[in-house]
Image (spheres, grey):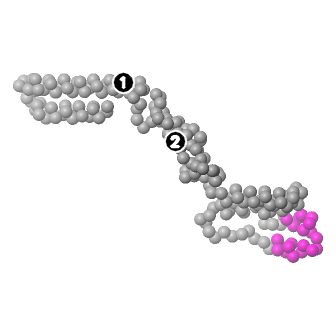
């Protein structure tokens, strides 16, 4: 994998014969631990090779080339960003039934790539906001149905001697009306 380094003019001299043989036999570093995925970034980005290429081809000073390689290695070994690296704040629900989630990085950002959230996200509220028109419609409809249940209960109590009401089993009918009243009250 390092044959391209042999083409550099400084490596073609006879004094570099030992280094030339080592480069011909060199193999990529093997990484047995699969639990550390950032280590593979050294094979992909080759910071040490770039260090020498910066010095030889770009005429960069050794100090600058080392600083650049160290920055690249630091970047490679930074963890991949995930949900543990940021926190979010949730605003109260607005009239449109949405709330704003604002994501902020915890302390200093020490990660890269991965799943990066948008800074501001609109999210639907898990409930209907009282100030919305939909809430007003549900409240009016539920209130009307509760009034209907009360009227129906009064109807059963007042006309309990009528034969048609007796056939409907008044205690059971009142229990059903009471259950319907509880269901409607749970909506409010």
Q: In the image, is 115 to the left or to the right of 26?
A: left
* Residue 145: x %, y % from top left: 26, 26
Q: In the image, is 163 to the left or to the right of 136?
A: left
Q: Residue at x 23, y 31 (%)?
A: 181
Q: Which residues are magenta?
A: 5-24
Residue 26 quadrant = bottom right
Q: Earlier in the sequence, mark 1 or mark 2?
A: 2
Q: In the image, is 31 to the left or to the right of 93?
A: right
* Residue 120: x %, y % from top left: 57, 38
Closer to us: 35 or 167: 35
Closer to us: 141 or 169: 141
Location of residue 87 with respect to 51 vertically, above or below: above
Element at label 1: helix
Count of residue discs: 2
- Give the quadrant of the C terminus: top left
Q: CA distance from mark 1 to mark 2?
A: 31 Å
* Residue 44: x %, y % from top left: 72, 60
Residue 53 in sight from this viewpoint: no
Q: Does residue 22 show up magenta in the picture?
A: yes
Name the residue that disc number 2 marks.
89
Residue 95 in sight from this viewpoint: yes
Q: Residue at x 45, y 36 (%)?
A: 125
Circle 1 packing at 10 Å, graded few (<14), some (14-19), many (20+), is: few
- Give the quadrant of the N terminus: bottom right
Q: Does residue 47 show up magenta in the picture?
A: no
Q: Residue at x 13, y 26 (%)?
A: 156
Name the residue that disc number 1 marks.
137
Q: Residue furthest toward the right?
A: 13
Circle 2 packing at 10 Å, graded few (<14), some (14-19), many (20+), is: few
Q: In the image, is 166 to the left or to the right of 187?
A: left
């Amino acid at each position: 994998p390092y044959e391209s380094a042999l083409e550099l003019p400084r490596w073609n001299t006879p004094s570099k014969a030992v280094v030339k043989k080592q480069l011909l036999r060199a193999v990529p570093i093997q990484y047995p631990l699969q639990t550390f995925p950032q280590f593979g970034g050294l094979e992909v980005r080759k910071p040490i090779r770039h260090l020498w290429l910066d010095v030889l081809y770009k005429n960069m000073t050794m100090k600058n080339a080392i600083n650049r390689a160290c920055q690249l290695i630091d970047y490679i070994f930074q963890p991949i960003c995930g949900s543990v690296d940021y926190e979010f704040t949730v605003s109260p629900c607005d009239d449109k039934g949405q709330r704003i989630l604002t994501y902020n990085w915890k302390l200093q950002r020490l990660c890269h790539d991965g799943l990066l959230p948008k800074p501001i996200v609109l999210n639907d509220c898990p409930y209907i906001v009282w100030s919305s028109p939909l809430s007003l419609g549900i409240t009016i409809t539920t209130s009307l149905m509760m009034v209907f249940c009360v009227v129906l209960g009064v109807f059963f109590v007042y006309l309990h001697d009528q034969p048609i009401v007796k056939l409907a089993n008044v205690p059971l009918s009142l229990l059903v009306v009471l259950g319907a009243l509880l269901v409607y009250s749970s909506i409010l």
